[in-house]
Image (cartoon, rainbow, N blue to C red):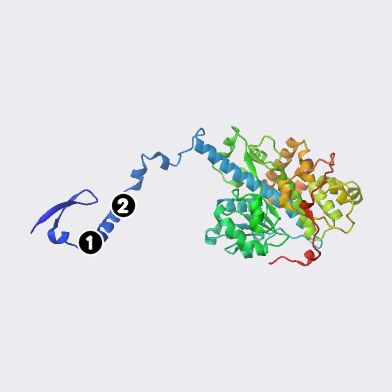
Amino acid sequence: MATCTIVDFTLAERVVTTEQLEMDDHSATIAAAAHHRRFLFELKMDDIMVNLKTFQPDYGAGIHEPLMSLRCRAKGQTVTACAHAFFFCRLLQATRQKREGGSQGLKLGIIGGGHIGKQLARTMLHLGGMSGKSIQISTRRPETLGEFEALGVTCFYDNRKLVGWADAVFLCCLPSHLPHICAEIQDVLTKCCIVYSLVTAIPLPRLKQLLSSNNILRPQYKFVESGLFQMWEASRTVVEALKDPAVIQATCPCNPNAEIVVNTKWLAAVFYAALNSYTWQRVTYMRALLFLNEACFPAKASTTSLDNRLESPELVCENFINQAFASTLQCNNTFPWFDLTAVQQRDSPFSQFLESTTSFQKVALLYRNLIAVLSTNTEDSMSAVSKKTSLSAVLLNPSKTLIHGLDGTFISKVEEGSSSDSEET
């Protein structure tokens, strides 16, 4: 019988008969694939990667390599974005707590359960002191969010349901998914629901077009070349980073020395969003100013009588709207509804008011104290912060009251039927 010699995957010689060589092609392919799988299983993969530098855990750890600079920027932007979102929620929460007949907690919805969505949820739960019942996450893979479900967060995949329930919705999805998500939720967005986008690749005008809404916040960040990005190098979570005083100082929205700078108009829009919240609750403009002053200046509110606070408020109408329009408001009128997208794209009275403030160092200090106290003891810090001068107390310098015109595109009268509209639950 004729024989021949062949070499297999293990490079070892073996002898086969002529009849074996006449095996049909299909069976031979199956046999070869099975033998190859056994070969790969027995092979130690660690041996393959021994001399491959890019597969090593510490690759790219050198502080002078370009890759490290990009990693630091990405980490810094994530931490800063979560800190600013937390600040926004704190101010908006204050407006809900002033509702007559008792307080109502802020309901937050997060679309996207990826890296940024998880970090944002952790920040709100562990630093913001929010209950898990006040947060819902919609993601394609809710089964991967067991960490949050254990804390009471409801996780599912239904973007429309989430938007109908939430007071504020955070977009934490991929840019490629955003057009489909916007098309899906735009018809269930209520007037009072604020959309806060953390999708940096989609500009604000495009978001407004996709959602057919002007109740949108989108912080715009820019990087300043500096050698201080090393503070983001530590391999720690966002929550851990926001317990570091140096990191908190770096995330302050009014820090002139920050490496990651946010547009001042975004900060102005956060306060206009708070006024919109009062307007939606049918709170008169005088009471809205009173409540906002109490939230921004708690020290004065605790030591000054109500009559004195009404007579000499730190914030007045002219800080938000032009004097001519303010003079037409009656005692039972609410503030007009502010277009948040326009506020972030053009100058407004309040954005110019903020830019006139020179106490940047004090702002940074108070901003740091606000987050630092909350991260140390979330529950006890709520009362502790109220005894200190707040971030807004310095940011909104009462010694300067500017009067500027506000273009009509920024505001519009609230429709008569707005009070009859209700959120879907």
Q: Position of residue 287 (x, y in %)?
A: 85, 55
Location of the C terminus by quadrant is: bottom right
Q: Could one spot residue 91 in this view of the protein?
A: yes
Q: Which of 178 and 385 is in front in this view?
A: 178
Q: In this view, does 370 lie above or below 420?
A: above
In what element is the residue under mark 1?
helix
State which quarter of the image contains the N terminus. Answer: bottom left
Q: Can residue 112 be seen in this view?
A: no
- 1 or 2: mark nearer the eye: 1
User: What residue is drawn where x is 81% and y is 58%?
Assistant: 413
Q: Where is residue 403 in the image (x, y as percent from the top left)?
A: 84, 43
Q: Disc 1 designates what residue?
A: 25
What's the residue type where badge 2 is placed? Leu
Residue in the image at 22% along x and 52% along y = 8
Nearer the N terminus, badge 1 or badge 2?
A: 1
Q: Which amino acid does label 1 sit on?
A: Asp
Which residue is depicted at the point 28% across and 57% down? 33
Tell me the residue that label 2 is attached to. Answer: 40
Q: Callout 2 environment at 10 Å: few (<14), some (14 to 19), or many (20+)?
A: few
Mark 2 falls on what kind of element? helix
How far apart marks 1 and 2 lie (CA) works out to: 23 Å
Left or right side of 413 for 241: left
In the drawing, what numbered circle is on residue 353?
A: none
Name the side, left or right, on which 309 lies relative to 180: right
Judging depth in this view, the residue of 221 and 297 nearest the camera is: 221
